[in-house]
Image (spheres, grey):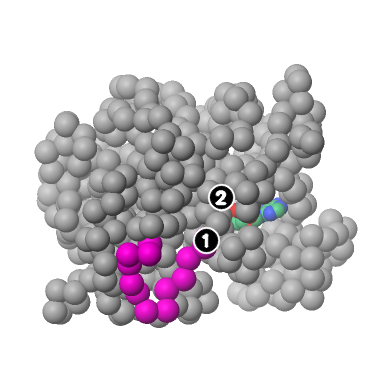
Amino acid sequence: MKVLVVGSGGREHALCRALSRDPAVSSIVCAPGNAGTADLAEPRPLDVGDPDAVAALAQSVQADLTIIGPEVPLVAGAADELRARGLTCFGPSAAAARLEGSKAFAKDVMRAAGVPTAAARDHTEIEPALADLDEFGPPYVVKYDGLAAGKGVTVTTDRAEAVAAVRSCLRRADDRVVIEEYLDGPEVSLFAIVTEAGTVVPLLPAQDHKRVGDGDTGPNTGGMGAYAPLPWAPPGLVPEVVDTVVRPVVDEMARRGTPFSGLLYAGLALTSRGVRVVEFNVRFGDPEVQAILALLATPLTDVLSGRRAPTWRSGAAVTVVVAASGYPQSPKVGDPISGLAAAQALTGVDILHAGTRRDADGRIVSSGGRVLCVTAIGSHLEAARGSAYEAISRLSLAGAHYRTDIGDLTRIGAPTWQAAPGGGASGSAERGP
Ligand code: AMP
Ligand code: GLY
């Protein structure tokens, strides 16, 4: 079958890589793609935010399946347009993509479905938003209510910074800000495939590191690295999250007449009071999916369609993002990258491209904030980590930076969270010793 992958980041390169290992896949198109996907998939220019253009491309390349990587085309209705033309697609409708597109909508669905999440209120006016800041107290959590590429959230103990964040979220008349209760405890990303028949298939849990600096310091980014699976996660975590989070949300969306299918990404905090949802996304998380797909042993198209349950290689995977100078505030682009072949040659290593392109001379240069997602598998987390950082040492990009503590349980502090006997999400969980 021919598969069209929509997008141009590390997630899409990881999808292309998994598809290239799938015996049912004869060819791949990745639009617009990057310098890495171009080795596996035919590149095509595409405005991913234009649903008509996405559907027209799927038709013209005669794609048997279209996988939509990023949230922007999903929220704009690309999946609806594809289905309206009778094309098969992996990704939710625009109505279902509101779970990511509007934090206020997601909160409403969670309330109706009884899903545990942080208390939150949304506002269009500054004064009542500031009153809520003081009612919730520090640490303050301020979110822009809309798509913000992972950068619309401020978590701070500094009231002046929180107030500034509220003001910057409310610049236009229709802007909305969400003020939220702070969630303590480690974060987990759990992805579940939801088939059109409503079957829920969880993937391996992963952990993403969103802050730019080691030790979770500095501003939030789109994600600086991830690892999977989580050796410290309690064995009952995945079934618990399916039962208390994913299934109720899928049922509630169906009840509303806007059924969800595609990838539901539950961003979770394992708090001292139990599992809480931080956010939903409606597509694979980047860079978590790079680590997760590196471990997938079942053909991807079988897993996406629900034909086969995923099976996993033993061991662990680590993805470290190599970011451009100035990321996340003002990434510098256009710099040549060298050492790619030497890094890729290491056993268990896969250099996935995120923000790269070929320049007029055929050199691979940086073209975005997150440039490379250096992914490695190993028999255990430390082995995978060692290979990933060995690969990075072979790469060269002027001014690049990366976190040195991805997957290092001794430095990120091996989370000790465990559900108390009798379950956690209802509030009976507690932090371990
Ligand atoms: P979001 O875009 O909602 O995923 O938020 C980005 C990041 O901000 C999350 O991954 C968390 O690290 C942090 N965050 C968001 N909401 C909260 C919260 N209520 N309490 C603590 N941290 C949060
Ligand atoms: N890894 C965070 C995200 O994809 O939103």
Q: Quadrant of the C terminus?
A: top right
- Give the structural element (helix, strand or loop) at label 2: loop
The image shows residue 23 at horizontal and vertical percentages of 16, 31
- Give the structural element (helix, strand or loop) at label 1: loop
The reply to whether residue 288 is in sight is no
On the image, numbered disc 2 is attached to which residue? Answer: 408
Q: Is residue 396 magenta?
A: yes
Q: Amino acid at mark 1?
A: Thr
Q: Is residue 151 above or below residue 60?
A: below
Q: Amino acid at mark 2?
A: Asp
Q: Is residue 33 above or below residue 183?
A: below
Q: Residue at x 47, y 30 (%)?
A: 202
Q: Residue at x 71, y 31 (%)?
A: 418
The magenta region covers 392-404
Q: Residue at x 37, y 71 (%)?
A: 368
The reply to whether residue 186 is in sight is yes
On the image, numbered disc 1 is attached to which residue? Answer: 404
